[in-house]
Amino acid sequence: MTVRTYRESVKTQGEAEVLDITPLAQKALGKSALQNGVLNAFVPGSTAAITTIEFESGAVHDLRAAIERIAPRAIHYEHDKRWGDMNGYSHVRAALMKPGLAIPFEGGELLLGTWQQLVLVDFDNRPRDREVIFQLVGE
Amino acid sequence: MTVRTYRESVKTQGEAEVLDITPLAQKALGKSALQNGVLNAFVPGSTAAITTIEFESGAVHDLRAAIERIAPRAIHYEHDKRWGDMNGYSHVRAALMKPGLAIPFEGGELLLGTWQQLVLVDFDNRPRDREVIFQLVGE
Amino acid sequence: MTVRTYRESVKTQGEAEVLDITPLAQKALGKSALQNGVLNAFVPGSTAAITTIEFESGAVHDLRAAIERIAPRAIHYEHDKRWGDMNGYSHVRAALMKPGLAIPFEGGELLLGTWQQLVLVDFDNRPRDREVIFQLVGE
């Protein structure tokens, strides 16, 4: 058993852009040469989240529409009043969706479904350079 | 330290059916003979999720009602327009709730609360045969 | 590789109080003397959740307002009709946000962002004595 920690840089556009990071997770798994264990994908910062979705433009659009219903851009946020960076909705969305997800792997393969991709959702209100951590615990 | 990966088959009815999978998690933990560590429950696929709840019919009903408010069945989904399988709401719900959850265990027992059950929520719009993965890392 | 499991007691006020538990997580990490691995924060019970947020009063207020929109206190809950403890909304909120989150650590430091704190959200409708589990797997 061992632990391996990798970082990948990702450029995002923000505003709930959804990026498929499955290839980056697979790359980390390959580098580790681990066969069985768990990959934890985690994005440091309080305005982004990680989940899975069928990564096709329709489902991605629908997810973004649901997020806009849950924490709309155009309502009042106290965070904005106090800090002036106008991304209060980004903070709420990220806290609700959470910054990490663990995916089991076996025989050197992530145990995702065929139409299930690991995605980063960047909720900030501007383009960002994000660092995503892929940490593997396994053997 | 070692890793053990088990699969269990579960028949679901879909439409946000909530199934108590705590006994399956305990079975996996028992088979592993591990005493201390973490059990990661994960459902491959993009229309189901895993969480915990007090598994009684009232709370389950209330959770399903909340999900229907968050991503209603009867609104338009782009996924449906493009793919025709009419389960766009299933995809959105699953992406929001996420497909996995890690539960610590100690002395061979899951550290859940007394009235806290591990559940699979199947958001698809039809009955499914699901495979749930229980992966344990521990000693 | 080893696993270490720590418990911390936390007094909460309930009603979606948000508590910064980052110092408790760091304390557990320090006690473990582990350098690289994953810390899993988990709260037993079905009326509390764990996530991350920029822990400042504005963002905390905004998160609580969003939660009130998602599962309002003043609507009907079946759980209340059946059990009479009037915290049906607490159960729904906790099931949606989930009771655990895994944070990677490296060089003995949690890999959180600079303005990202680990928080416990207590959704119950009364003050509670909570036990939070910090379980570390690493080397």
Image (cartoon, coloured by chain):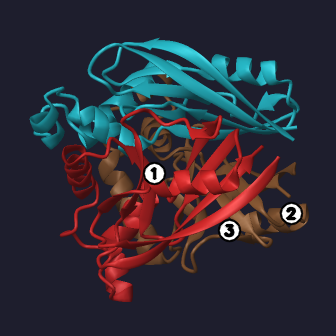
Chain colours: A brown, B red, C cyan
* Foreground of the two, C59 or A11: C59
> What is the distance, in whole Å, between disc 2 and disc 1 at their CAs?
29 Å
Task: Please tell me whether residue B90 is drawn above or below residue C106 in the rendered image.
Answer: below
- SS at mark 1 in the image: helix
At a point 46% along the width and 54% down the height, the residue shown is: B23
* Circle 1 residue: B22
| x, y percent for residue B57 | 21, 49
Residue A62: tell me if it is visible.
yes
Q: Secondary structure at mark 3?
A: helix
Task: Give a yes or no on whether discs 1 and 3 share a subunit.
Answer: no
Residue type beneath disc 3: Thr
The numbered dot on residue A34 is 2
User: What is the distance, in whole Å, between disc 3 and disc 2 at their CAs?
Assistant: 17 Å
Subunit of label 1:
B
Q: CA distance from mark 1 to mark 3?
A: 29 Å
C131 lies above or below B32: above
Mark 2 belongs to which subunit? Answer: A
Mark toward the viewer: 2 or 1:
1
Q: Give percent across and percent down for residue C75.
A: 12, 38
Q: Name the quadrant containing residue C15.
A: top left
| Residue underneath mark 3 | A22
Under tag 2, what secondary structure?
Answer: loop
Say what amino acid the circle numbered 1 marks.
Thr
Instruction: Locate residue B125, reporting x and y percent.
Output: 29, 76
Q: Residue at position x 24%, y 44% from top? A: B59
